[in-house]
Amino acid sequence: ATVIRREDYTPPAYWVDTVELIFDLDPAKTRVLNRMRLRRNPDVPAQALRLDGDDLNLARVLVNGQGCSFKMDGSTLVLESLPEGHEPFELEIFTTCAPEKNTQLMGLYVSQGTFFTQCEAEGFRRITYFLDRPDVMASYTVTLRADKARYPVLLSNGNLVESGDLPGPGNEGRHFAKWVDPHKKPCYLFALVAGNLVAREQRVRARSGQEHLLQVYVRQGDMDKTEHAMNSLIHSVIWDEARFGLPLDLERFMIVATSDFNMGAMENKGLNIFNTKYVLANSATATDTDFANIESVVGHEYFHNWTGNRVTCRDWFQLSLKEGLTVFRDQEFSMDLCATPSARAVKRIEDVRVLRTAQFPEDAGPMAHPVRPDSYVEINNFYTVTVYEKGAEVVRMQQTLVGREGFRRGMDLYFQRHDGQAVTCDDFAQAIADANPDSDLARLLPQFKRWYSQAGTPRVHASGHYDAATQRYTLTLSQSCEATPGQAEKQPFVIPVAVGLLDAQGQDLALQLVGETVPAGTTRLLVLTEPQHSYTFEGVATEPVPSVLRGFSAPVLLDMAQSDAHLLHLLAHDSDPFNRWEAGQRLALRRALAAIRAEGPAPTAPLDNAFLDAMRSVLRHPALDAAFKELVLTLPAESYIAEQLDVVDPQRIHAVRETMRQQLANALFDDWVWAWEQHKDNGAYRPEPVSTGRRALAGLALGMLCLAARDSGDTVWPGKTYQRVKDADNMTDRFNALSALVVSGHALARDALARFHTLFKNEALVLDKWFALQAGAPDRGGNVLPAVRQLLAHPDFHLKNPNRARSVIFSYCNANPAAFHREDAAGYVFWSDRVLEIDTFNPQVASRLARALDRWKKLAEPYRSAAREAIARVAAKPDLSNDVREVVTRSLA
Ligand code: DPP
Ligand code: ZN
């Protein structure tokens, strides 16, 4: 496999100005006529035209209407004798492909009788020969022809200009539709859909007065699950105009749902294609989390219309240019839809939790790469939490450094400069800085851009010193960053650290740095650029409690020796909700790590009264929101705990965390009863933050009550929980109750699962949850793996459907560490079998699964050696896909 390097980028040798595609759609053999106008790029030396292709049958090549010679270099079509000079010429290519045999779900494929496409990153070459790279932007005209009865709906990008029945013999029962996209686009944004679908429609009027048609296409029978996606789309249109002045630039904007999709969704111009998981929802089938995810994914794909489509990436190394920025935008969108600061903070905490539990491990493991990678073998492997979530943090830091208005100015300049272009991450940061010439970002830009070029999570060490005599408090910050593959030494980053100081009553102090004449605010942004720097505040009357990295102002690991007393003070009082939550997490983490590291068997009571009392105070607090309480009362995840350790024993981590949960359940029993009673009734279901938070807290309480019941032998609470599974009026409450029984391992779980299956056997997305819950259940004496094997044999299990495969296999291998890491290595053998099996038909899904053992080097024995062996077993297969090959090679390096 070839390594592709960023430094080797060269502009394309040819430009494609227009593309006319004519499809005769047939599942077994689809015929594709591709007529392009090309011209040589005058800026590069004359050379042959090399067109990418993959899995195509080539029938004919014409240049300006004449047959012409060509050759194949592997799967690349090479044309050497093209017209000289820089005049445009016409190239016509006729190919066929077999959509029904396309199990990779890249290119043109069939899902439940409907045609779909997925072209990002390099799927267009599976539809026709092309310059399949994002910096080649063309105007598209697309004609779809198909059987009218089977494929009544024919969609592509842009505007429908013509449609009707096809005339002539041989065309009986066939019809066509012709679409013209008014915007130039790279081919990865091409899309078509053909099938028997229905649409929810809504007309909206933009500020300019222009009318737009919004459509959400689904299968018949799913219409009652489209309201939320449509509402989310309408909110997205309004928000992007209001916050960034970015209007919808199309007459028609379509979303289409498919149940077979490798990713979440795809921002094809004017024709977004979505995994059903991120479209379909009603209160009976979807949880609050589903509703929230739909809102952010609908927003995300819509926002790509500007950040991604109008301005796209020069090459795939720049992926975070669109993804980091668009994740940032969807995060801001969801926050702006929140009515209260507390709800905003909850969203921020949830986003940081994803970053720390998924991206930090990636950045410390064999697949660590910069936000803008330097090389790849398979670009599909770089749609990562680093490119997306860390990329979003890098954009967020730019906003933090220039302020919210300054960031808006920067975005305006970015579009003024680059609308219609394919650009780089450098271009983006430059625009934000240039629009804010007096900012720290402008002053520090070259150093700031190390966030794009250096991998690894920086570690910030903070220590405070109070001098009573001078009434000064000095905070010393230092930074370091561990080596990552290919990057032994790191240069210092620009790290914005938001800091506050609390007095003994828990009030924020007004902060005045030495040299300033008056205090300025209670949260100060310290911008650390050196390896170490000290900041001295004056006029500090008594020793303060520092609150460092408020709002998680930078994606770093913060080391700070904080006493329990300080952390308890922050948990009780910090005005910054993020750090208030973080104080509770640190208290819990400290106790977990002590118990894990203790000699001998794991302690039976890792939690002390001070901690339990603090948790009780939060739970019973009269002013805090339920959503925030639920976050505080949830212990750090096993994967997050594992990252704090040099040597990881997954069984020990699990045992300790389970003991802590049990203790929390027992010690706060009366409080959980109170929490349940207070939060269980919420009136008619609405997916908004307040009742969502209340359902989450009620669900946590119920889980705790079932755990406590397991210890005490009580049957009342499991009975009530079972009742809730039966009569809850929404999926959130129903599923929380089902989880409570399954997680506590109660005997009623079996019955509840069976009942749940019967109720929802025709709801694919609900069945995914049913599978995932069982594959992710706490392990009791090694019972999960046999259960997983049974689930694979279940008549409703379909390995080729990515959602279903993920619901069982990923829930087990990636999200259930104690069940997966078995002393007998059976979990790893299962994993390697599945990676190899899935790789034969869907390399992208296989490659994600292959990453379940990313952190094997940290494992204690016997896990470490067994994991290595399992990876080596995968690597030993000679005909692996590039996708899986790249992951296992890096893992073993
Ligand atoms: N570009 C898609 C997204 O992240 C993924 N292919 O929205
Ligand atoms: Zn995206």
Image (cartoon, grey):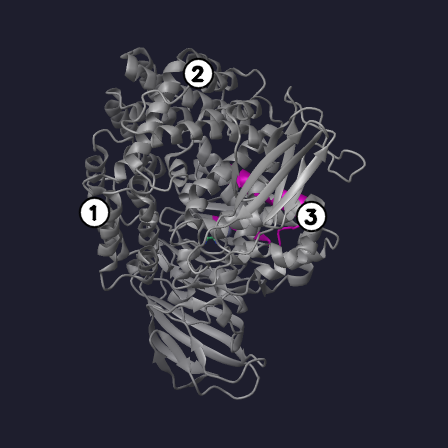
Query: On the image, which quarter does residue 591 sit in?
Result: top left
* Predominant SS of the magenta segment: helix
Looking at the image, which is closer to me, 176 or 685? 685
Query: On the image, which quarter does residue 525 sit in?
Result: top right
Q: Amino acid at mark 2?
A: Asn
Residue drawn at x 32%, y 48% as measured from the top left: 857
In the image, residue 817 sits, relative to residue 401, either above or below, namely: above
| Residue bearing the label numbered 3 | 402
Residue drawn at x 38%, y 51% as measured from the top left: 262
Residue 774 part of the magenta-drawn span: no
Q: Which residues are magenta?
A: 228-255
Tags 1 and 3 in contact by the CB under 8 Å rule? no
Query: On the image, which quarter does residue 725 sit in?
Result: top left
Quarter in which the C terminus is drawn: bottom left
- The local crowd at label 3, few if under 14, some if 14 to 19, many if 20 or more residues have their Cα within 10 Å, is many
| Residue bearing the label numbered 1 | 829
Q: Position of residue 735 (x, y in %)?
A: 37, 27
Label disc, if present, on residue 609 of the rendered structure: 2
Q: CA gap, disc 2 to disc 1?
A: 43 Å
Residue depth check, mark 2 versus mark 1: number of the one nearer the observer:
2
Kindly state the secondary structure of the residue where label 1 is placed. helix
Name the outermost residue toward the right: 517
Looking at the image, which is closer to me, 148 or 817? 817
Q: Earlier in the sequence, mark 1 or mark 3?
A: 3
Q: Amino acid at mark 3?
A: Val
Q: Amino acid at mark 1?
A: Val
- The local crowd at label 1, few if under 14, some if 14 to 19, many if 20 or more residues have their Cα within 10 Å, is some
